[in-house]
Image (cartoon, rainbow, N blue to C red):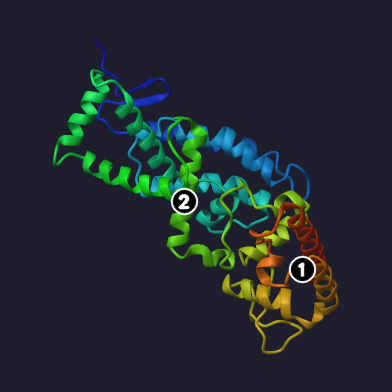
Amino acid sequence: MRLAKDYKYLGLWLQSNCRYTTHYRQLLVKANRVAYLIRRVITPGNPPRIPIIVALVRAILIPVIAYGIPFLRPNKEQLGQLDTILAKVVRPAMGLPGTAPTLSTLVEVGLPSTIFLRRSALLHLFRRFVKLPSTHPSSQTFRMELRRPRSRTKTFRSLVEELNEVERVSGVTHDAPNLDNMVRHAKAATFAWWKSTGQKRRLQRLLPTLDVDTPPYYYVDDRTTASYRCRLRFNLALLRDSKFKRHLARSPMCRWCPGKMETPRHFLLKCPEFCYERFQLEMELRWSNVDLSLPTILGHLPALPIGLKRDVLRHTGRYISRICRRRRC
């Protein structure tokens, strides 16, 4: 009988040394190819908008990455490479530069990190083993491994406990073993991790909502306005403070306000150069009984009804578009 170093079975590459390097290498090639095909349809200022791109990523790219992922043991670097592939697709549609933080980019559009995508897939696999009849070979092997005190499944037990806690908090269950439930659970776990690590400062301390796949302003703003608003949320607009931090400007001070740093808060709320546009916005928001604040302008409106939220997003979108065109952001 001829021996083979690796063998493909049902889309999963098996190796004679029980490693996964061949499958991971093939996965990178396929994921990069699919990501390239999605990026080809993105053109600046033209359709499709970010909700369509996110839907393509969820429908095409994430299934490619998630297939067979419970049977792999990738390290953090390899999982980070897969996250980078996901972020590379949505950054051009969001109008963000390549330096935008990967995890914050995924959280902003409601995409899960591959770390928690794999953990959620493992939990699905464990639940499926548990629900099998006790006479099934897979169920017997799994239960036998769990009873071993020094087996690798010790980490599996802690993983199940951790994800059950996230399941309890987020309200997402794994009763139906499908990809949508797995992605929803991984998305909730990604958001919880992003929030706990203090990375919400990346988005001006704004907390995206979990009840939608993409922020509401992407459905109301045009591509250019949505790009302006997104760059301001990430503090990656062409303001002097942001450019100074990225070593692209000599000074972070505002050109119209001596001694004041040109931050998003100063640019949107305090700079006297745009007092007329700001006064118009304040009058429009007063009719809606909404206060003028930085979260309101940047599209963080969790407590408003849908109709009022759209009106406020239209008003703030016009304001952002006017001043950013004058400022050339």
Query: Which residue position is annotated with label 1?
Result: 289
- The quarter holding residue 259 reads bottom right
Q: Is residue 33 in view?
A: no
In this picture, is 174 found above or below 7?
below
Q: Secondary structure at mark 2?
A: helix
Give 54 or 313, whichever is nearer the viewer: 313
Query: Which residue position is annotated with label 2?
Result: 190
Residue 261: % across, % down: 65, 82
Going by the numbered disc 2, the residue's amino acid type is Thr
Q: Secondary structure at mark 1?
A: loop
Q: Nearer the viewer, mark 2 or mark 1?
A: 1
Going by the numbered disc 1, the residue's amino acid type is Asn
Residue 101: % across, % down: 53, 58
Give 296 or 115, whichever is nearer the viewer: 296
Specify the label residue 42 is tagged with.
Answer: none
Residue 299: % across, % down: 68, 61
Residue at image x 21%, y 26%? Answer: 141
Instruction: Mark 2: give few (<14), some (14-19) or many (20+) Cα within 10 Å.
Output: many
Can you say which quadrant of the picture contains the C terminus? bottom right
Label 2 vs label 1: CA separation? 34 Å
Q: Is residue 147 left or right of residue 294?
A: left
Residue at image x 41%, y 40%? Answer: 120
Residue at image x 81%, y 63%? Answer: 315
Can you say which quadrant of the picture contains the N terminus? top left
In this picture, is 210 found above or below 315?
above
| Residue farthest to the top, as pictured | 1
Q: Is residue 30 left or right of residue 148?
A: right
The answer to which of marks 2 and 1 sits earlier in the sequence is: 2
- The quarter holding residue 318 reads bottom right
Residue at image x 35%, y 28%? Answer: 128
Residue 126: % across, % down: 32, 33
Q: Is residue 196 left or right of residue 102?
A: left
